[in-house]
Each structure stands twice: as structure tokens, then as C-alpha cells.
Amino acid sequence: MRGRRHLGFVAAAATLLAAAPMSAIFERWTWLLDSAIAVALIAGVATLTRSLRAPVWAQVLSMLGALLLGLTWIFPGGGELLGVVPTPDTIAHFGALLNGSATDMRTYGVKVPDTDPLLFVVVLGVGAVAIVVDLLTVGLRRPALAGLPMLAIYSVPVAVYVDNVPAMPFVVGAIGFLWLLAADNVNRVRHFGRRFTGDGRDVDIWEPSPLAAAGRRLAVVGVVIAVLLPLAAPQMTDGLLNRFNNSGTGIGEGNGRGGPGGGVQLFSALRGQLNQTAVTDYVKVTTNEPEPFYLRFATADRVRSAGFDPRPSTGSPLNQLPDPRVGAAPGISFNTYRAQVEVTNFNMQMLPIYANPVGFSNLDGNWLYDKSAQVVFSNRRLSKGKKYSFDYVRATYTQKVLEGIKPLAGNDPIRANFTEVPQVPEVEQLVGELTRGKTTQYAKVRAIYDYFSRDNGFTYSLSTEGGTSGEDIVNFLDNKVGFCQQYASAMAWLVRAAGIPSRVAFGFTVGGSERENSYTLTNLNMHAWTEIYFAGAGWVPFDATPAANVTGSTRTDWAPDTDAPDPVAPAAAPSAAPGANATAGPDAADRPERGFDDPNLAGGGTLSTDTTTWPWWTASGVLALLLLLAGPAMRRSALRRRRQLRTEAATNAVAAEGDPPPGVVRVVVTGGEADRARADAHAAWDELLDTMVDFRVQVDRTETPRATAERLITQDLGETGSEAARLLGRAEERARYARTPLAGGELNPALRTVRQSLAARADRRTRLMATVLPPSVLLQWRLAVMDGSERFVAATGRFRDGLLRWSPRRLLANRTAAR
């Protein structure tokens, strides 16, 4: 019973370790604390019921009760008895949390904040897995099957994580599963009373089992392979090799729509700085529209004290797009165009589109269209690398048409949802002054729009100043210095204060044109502007940011440029981003730095551009692969060259003392010359054996050189080749066994003759392998690896034996035996 209790706690701990992948989803670790409480309650109740010898079904019921009590305590609904006893109101509260979790799943991208609905689902799931693992491990004694529910936890981040799931949480979960298996194995083995090795030798009490040690080593190797192999496989993840292709200039990690690290922050703040140091291509778009407007990807319509942020997106399939021409006000003209978009480094859960799309191509069902926000989004996919096309309707307004549109009724849902704004007295007073005497909605909007002009003291800068009012909107309106997000948010705020629906839109201005109607959009084109709702016209764009400071800025008839463009001196013309059609600010203090909507450096400097590095990495990889494949051939060539130089030097030294007559082999007498001649013969013989291995001729190192030479002759070497083989065999034989070795023999020509003869009789594949991947070199390397492995095993064995001498378990066992 003690072993089963121990195994139950191991099962609980293994479940918590298996839940480690959940850390890839949440921003904080609250989920782990709540899950640990629930799992501890389950393990404690299971241990108590087993100590009472309750049947398995009773154990399961008790664990379910413990999970229910734990959930009631962690997520109270307010109607519990004594704070922990659930009631029908508690169950209804749990149902509301489940419904809320579905909404939060659609709202947030990973990593998600600690919301009660999401935490409730995680604790409920981990607790249920803990019950199943305990049942399989302790109740049914099938711990191997417990890996299935534990794997189910790991499948959660795999299903929702838009990037690669980190490997370390998987390693932690695998360790928990291996620990569970090892604990069950130890518990089973203890029933036998004694342990033994695979060869039948008894194992002392202090000595670890060799079989267990082998199992641990295999488990570690298996986990390492399971983690590293997918990282290197490009089709399973981004691939470890593919990470070299990341130049680090992407828009972000893509960890969620507008979340940290996910690219552009959709929170249209009225403070802060935004600087970037390099020009990076984000989107390439081709359209048949002669003068396209801004390419948009998100909107922010929920006002906060510091600005605007987006609502949770809810969408419908892309084949259910509304027609913006239905119900349009008279006088609005519509034209249909088509655009093709290629997303390069823009890595978010939204797709850049033109307003009013009516049909998409090359997008799967993971992408949805939010009719209210007019954005295309996904909860499971990122935009980077997408290529798609769509048809869209461009609506053109005139001031006369907008002047004739009446305001929405007070109970209209759009007016109710998009006019909420905190009450700020300074803003209310300013809006009252600007709209005094204005009778139409468009007149009020134009009065607010015209206010953000240089004549009223507004300038553009990425470096903003603080204030003492306590309100960011008031600080901006007092300082009158900011960048596009602040202008867009401030105008939307003032328009809402006038009772007119408005929001902030995010996207790209018109980029540089590579060819007609084809544009490249970079970080310099990223922009924010205001959209105002007019009944019968929809969301009409107004860009209050000074046009002279926005790359690719576009002004319209209903929202013209309120500032006269500054003249540009030839020496100060921008030279970096192609297609920039705006001038710099009036002076250096107002000139924007490189950033969200920076036009260029006005001082004539050149911006650094994003450089694609994949060709260099590809070329380096191919070169490294070629060098790796050429390694054996280079090693074989170097070895042959060294042996030839040795024998040639020896032959020249002997010939210098007097060349023997033709056909006569000179006999070396002196000791130094004899040693050198023996070494030369051995080098030539080694080269001959390697040549035989290269051409797949069997080598038997136990036979004599003469026997090897005669067997080689049977390979149909021809007369010349046979004489050369006999010469090499005779030289090696004399070097091994005779008092005086042979010298002066033409060993190198003999080696070349034998090699040519073997190559002549070999097939094409054998000759190719002997040249490119010489089997002799591969054999040498294989033997060297085996020798190194044997030495390593021997060294680790000696080290292990040394440690075992001082093992506390052995010392305690010896002391017990002495007593």
C-alpha cells in the first residue's frame, strides 16, 4: 500500500510536469499555481480513499469530488456554502466561465492574459488529466497508457500556437512521463526482493541496476532525438536550419494579434516614441486602380484614457462578404478594382486589404472577415508569406454628398457603440468651440479636421513631451506635437465628443512603385488615420497627420491637405525610399525620425535597407556540403601524396650513392638506410592495401605479403601489373622478415601500375566511389570512431567504479553487514 501511495503522488507530479507546455500560452504562471492546488487535492483524496481500501469506482468519484471542490474554491461564484461547497449557482457560474472561455479564445492571441474563463478551462483540463493518469497508473496498473492523456495537454499549445511550440516544455513533460514509468518499474521490482543484471549477476543493495541505467540512457537519447530532430526538419517546424534565414528585421514574433512581440501595437496611444533604424519591405501589392488609397489591416474603436485599442474580432467566411453598394446614399460613385498582395515580412494575424472587399482568392477557411471592423483576420494563421488576390469596391465621395448626409439617430447601434468617450472638460470645451454654428455632420468633422494644422501650431515629431494635466489627450492638445497615432486618436476622440461615430484605422500609405500599379510597402509606409461613419456612406477616411511628414500620404477632395506643402530644395531632396511624395518638415526640430510613418531623412542621408540573406546562407550550406563530401577524397589524396613523397625521397637518397644496373635491386647494408628502406616498404604496402580496399578487393591482414601479392595477381592485372604487385610484396616481405630490406626499387611506379590495373578491371561505380568516397578512408574513420568509443566507455567505467567506492549506499551496506 505504501508503494501505491508513493506512485499516486508521482502520478500527480508527472501530470504537473506534463502541463509545462501551457507556459507557452499564458503570459504569467497563475495557471500553474491553480492547477497545482487542484492536482494536490485530487492526489490527497485519492490516497485517502486507497488507504480505506475503497474500490476503484469510489476512488474515481472521490477524485471528481475533490476537483469540483477545488474549482469552487479557486473560482467562486458567490453562492457557495461555506465558501467551498458548490450550489446550483456555482454550476451556472462554471457554465458562464466556459462560455466566456470560447469568447476569450477568439479574442486573444498567444500569449494570453490571466482571465478567469481561460484559467478555469486549464485547471479543469489539468485536473481531469490528473484523475485519468492516477486511475491508469495506480488503479489499473497501466502507467504506459497514462502517456495518452498527458500528451493531450501538449496538443493544446500545438493546436493554438501560431508559431513553433517551444521545445523545453515538451522535454519537461517527457521527463515527467519517464519518471512515472521508472517509479512504477521500481515499485514492481521491489516485490521480487532482489535485483539482478542481464547476465544473471546479483546486484548489491548499494549498486544501481545496470538494466535501469541502460534504460535511463536510452530514455535520455530518445528525448534528445525527439526534440532535436523536429527542429532540424523544415517541414515540421520553421526548421533549425531555416532560422539562419531570419535577418531579424521582421515585424515581430507573431505571438498574437496586436500583442507583445506580435508586430505593430494596435493600441493607438497618445504618448510614447516609435523609432526604427532600417527600411524593411512588408507588403508588395499590385492593383489596377490608378490612384489607390491606403492599404488597411486593423481598426481600434474601444476608447481608453490613453487612446484606442481594438475590439475582439468576430467574423464570417470570406464567401459571405457584404456589398457596400447596397443602401448607399445618392451621389456616391463606386468602381471595382482587383489587387494582388504578397506579404513578405508583415507577420500578424491580420491581412492587409483595401476597404470594401467583395471577393477573395487563394485564402483558406482559417481566414474570416469582420464586417464591423472591415478586417480579415485569423485565430490560427499568420500573414507572413501569404499570396492572395481580391476584388474591392472604391467609393468616391464629394463634399456636397457628405454635406447632405444627416446624423444617425440617437438610438442607432453604431452611434451608441462608436461615440463612447470619457468626459474631459478641456476636450468638451474645445469641441464646443470648433463646432459652434456648424449645422451638418460633415461641417463639424471638417472643423475638427482643419484644427490639426500648422496654422494652429501642430507639428510632427516622434519625440513627444509630457504634460501636467493628467490626461494624455489634453497633453497632446496642449503640446501640439506628435506622430500619426496621436493625430488619428486625437481626431477620433474629438469627433466622438461631438456625438459622431469614429475609430482609428491602421495600415500602409501608398508605397514606392517598382512598375506601373505595383507598390512595395515598407515600415516607412506604416500609418494610422481616422475613419468617420456617415449614414449611407459607411466609414469615410480622414487623415489629420501633416501630409508633409507622411511617406506616400494621400489627400482627398473631402479631406484636403490643410497645410501648404513646403518647397523642397534640390540638395535636400529625399533619396532613400522609392515613391516618397512628401517633403520634410519645416525645420530640423519637426523632422520625424525613422519610424512608423517617416518619409525619409531630409538631410540627404541614405537609409539602410533590408538585405535578404538566404542566398548567402544557401551558398554557404552548399559549400559546406561539398566540403563535407570532398573530405574523404581529400584525405585519401593527402595520404597517398605523403606516402609517395616518402618513398621518392628514400629512392633518391639511395640513387645518389650509385644507381644499380637495370633490373638489379640494391641491397642496403648500413643501419640508417635499412630503417629507411623498411619504412618505405611499409608505406608502399599500406598504400597497396588501401588501394585494394578502394577497389573492393578482399584484404586479409593475417596472410603473408607474398600470399597477398599472389592473390592480387589472380585479379587479372596483366603482366605489368602482376610484376608490380610481386615487387611490392617482395619489398614488404624483406622489410618484415629479412635482415637487409630491398632498396632502390621503383615502388611508386609499381603502385601506380597496380592502381591502373585494378581501375581497368573495375566497373564505373567502383571507380567513382574509389575517387569520391574512398572505402579505405571511410573504414579508417569508422575504426577510429569505434576505438574512441571503446576508450570513452572504459574511462567512464573507471570513473564510475571510483565513485562507487565512496557511495553512501555502499558504506551504509558495509556498516550494516559488519553489525
Image: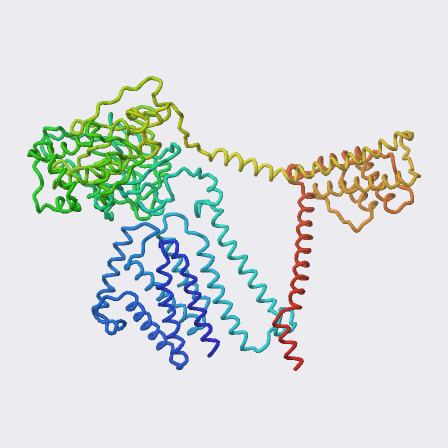
Image position of 766 with respect to 107: above or below: above
Q: Position of residue 68 (x, y in %)?
A: 30, 70
Q: Quadrant of residue 522?
A: top left
Q: Position of residue 55 (x, y in %)?
A: 38, 79
Q: Can you see residue 357?
A: no
Q: Position of residue 355 (x, y in %)?
A: 22, 36
Q: Nearer the viewer, residue 118 or 722?
A: 118
Q: Residue at x 70, y 41 (%)?
A: 695
Q: Residue at x 7, y 37 (%)?
A: 406
Image position of 742 with respect to 115: above or below: above
Relative to 451, 224 lies left or right = right
Q: Quadrant of residue 746?
A: top right
Q: Can you see residue 533?
A: yes
Q: In the orientation shown, which residue stands out farthest toward the front? A: 468
Q: Position of residue 452 (x, y in %)?
A: 20, 32
- Image quarter (top left, top right, bottom left or bottom right) of the C terminus: bottom right
Q: In the orientation shown, which residue stands out farthest toward the top? A: 570
Q: Nearer the viewer, residue 348 or 630?
A: 348
Q: Residue at x 37, y 25 (%)?
A: 576
